[in-house]
Image (tube, rainbow, N blue to C red):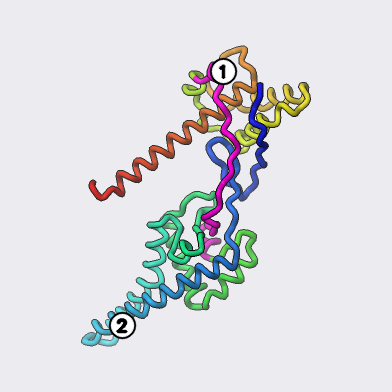
Amino acid sequence: MSWASSATVGVGDDDFVTGEAVALDLPPASIGSRILSGFIDYVIVVALSFGLLTAGSALARQLDDALVAAVLLVCFLLAWVAYPVTIETLTRGRSVGKMAAGLRTVRDDAGPITFRHALTRGLLGVVEIYLFWGIPAVIASVASNKGKRLGDMAAGTYVVRDRVAAHLPPPVPMPPHLAAWATSADISQLPDDLAMSVRTFLPAAPSMTPSARAELGQTLLAEMSLYVSPPPPPGSHPEYILAAILADRRRRDGMRLARDRALRDRLTSPHR
């Protein structure tokens, strides 16, 4: 049998693995681009702070000193915490500065951030960015191999270049005679590292010696069999079975993403 000739790199700790076990290396943003996006966001926050403080001071003229201090504190919290956290949550990791610089904040597993991640980054950002002029953030980013500031370290996030195209190898085709079995099989517990090993083996198999190819195929199939039920039809070639599992894993992942997207569209639709 013949597979696509594109080889796939191994999975590292910093890789994101797709449903077909393809590792995507999301490159961290450079220090320069992060400083640029941070400066844009800083200017926006300062302008917002000035506007809120001006409005708050005008409203607080008739209040006593304690209430004036409370109003000013609320203005600072709105500008320094509420605004950054809200915009990063709603845009799934992008601020105005990041949009301008082509950056995005993602989780360590390359998934989109949530309110919890944005809140942690926002709270620590008050200290490391606004109170200390970003100096702790720059020092931490230089020391981190993924350019993380202190807020990223606490939240489990990092900033990536959002305008990088991912070049994926061709998907593994589904062997037609195993499609019915793969569709009904339980493959939900298949580990990513094992799927990645199979994804690397299949395109490389034609270039291997027959004995090494057969031995590795049988070994991978034996490992796969621990996570797949029911077993495949007897007499099927190991490489066809491995391909069927990966192909259906990719199909299921696509269906899950489509369901999530449809649910998100329904929840955010203005016509609900």
Q: Residue 192, position in %: x, y?
A: 58, 38
Amino acid type of disc 2?
Thr
Check whether the beta carbons of the residues at disc 1 and disc 2 lie within 8 A of each other. no
Region of the chain picked out in magenta, as a range: 151-179
Q: Residue 222 occupies which quadrant of the picture?
A: top right
User: In the shown orientation, is residue 39 left or right of residue 144?
Assistant: left
Q: Which sits in the foreground, 150 or 233?
A: 233
Q: Residue 20, position in %: x, y?
A: 55, 35
Q: Residue 15, position in %: x, y?
A: 60, 47
User: In the shown orientation, is residue 10 left or right of residue 92?
Assistant: right
Q: Residue 47, position in %: x, y?
A: 39, 77
Query: Looking at the image, which residue is at 55% across and 57% down?
Result: 161
Query: Looking at the image, which residue is at 56% across and 18% down?
Result: 232
Instruction: Name the secondary structure under disc 1.
Output: loop
Q: Tell which circle, 1 or 2, labels the residue nearer the N-terminal end.
A: 2
Amino acid type of disc 1?
Pro
Q: Residue 235 occupies which quadrant of the picture?
A: top right
Q: Which mark is residue 232?
A: 1
Above or below, 206 against 20 in this view is: above
Q: Which mark is residue 54?
A: 2
Q: Which sits in the foreground, 197 or 210?
A: 210
Q: Is residue 58 magenta-colored?
A: no
Q: Which mark is residue 220?
A: none
User: In the shown orientation, is residue 69 left or right of residue 30?
Assistant: left
Instruction: Name the secondary structure under disc 2.
Output: helix
Q: Residue furthest left?
A: 62
